[in-house]
Structures are given as C-alpha cells and as structure tokens.
Image (spheres, helix red, strand yellow):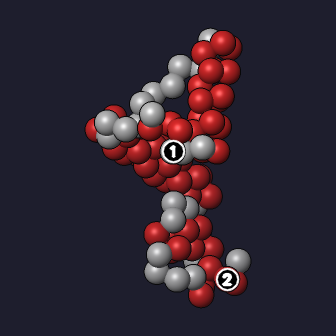
Amino acid sequence: VEALAHIGPTAGQAIGIREIQALLRAEISREICIETIQRRTRNYAKRQLTWFRREAWAAQLDLGDACATTHIIHNTVRTLMHPAASTL
C-alpha cells in the first residue's frame, strides 16, 4: 500500500490505481471504488475490441470447434518455430 505513493506516472495510469488511492485517502467509499474500477475495466475492454476490429491482421478465432482449434494451434506453433516456411 505504501508503494502506491511512489508509483511512476505510467503505472499510475493503470486501471484501479487512482481509485485505490482515493479509497485509501477516504475520498470515496469501497462500493464506489469497486464500481468505478469495474466500469473503467469494461470501457477499456470495449476500446480494445474496437481497435482489434479495425486491424486487418487481427483475425477472430472461433475456438468452438475442437478440430479447427487443433488446426489453428498447429499452424501457429509451426509459424512461430519456422517463420520463413510460413511465407511459402
């Protein structure tokens, strides 16, 4: 808890840091702290989904089919282990 007072500017932007600091200073209630962290987390997740939808390289994977999932994993591992072979 004492480390929160000495946190750097980048880490200080992490979801929950400001809320926890305000809670420790008794500026907000525990309930408000939790609600705010939950809301900010949901908003961040929505922004990530929006960003990924705009990126052509970020294809969504349907992992509901076991055979398709196995195929995806196999191809991913093969590409990571032999990147030059994946461009052929």
Residue under label 1: 84
- Crowdedness of circle 2 by 10 Å Cα count: few (<14), some, many (20+)? few
Quarter in which the N terminus is drawn: bottom right
Q: Is residue 35 visible?
A: no
Which of the image's four quarters has the C terminus? top left
Q: Is residue 57 above or below residue 29?
A: above
User: Which element type, helix, strand or loop, lies under badge 2?
Assistant: helix
Residues at marks 1 and 2, CA–CA distance in whole angstroms:
46 Å
Query: Does the CB distance between marks 1 and 2 fall below 8 Å?
Result: no
Q: Seen in the image, is 16 located left or right of residue 10?
A: right
Taking the image as shown, residue 20 lies to the left or right of residue 36, namely right
**Callout 2, which amino acid?**
Ala
Q: In the depicted view, which residue is nearer to us: 10 or 56?
A: 56
Q: Residue at x 43, y 49 (%)?
A: 44
Residue at 32 percent across and 40 percent down: it is 55
- Which residue is disc 2 drawn over? 3
- Point out which mark residue 42 bears: none
Residue lying at 45% horizontally and 43% vertically, measured from the top left: 45
Of badges 1 and 2, nearer the viewer stands 1
- Left or right: 46 in relation to 4: left
Name the residue type under label 1: Ala
Residue 56, quarter of the rendered image: top left
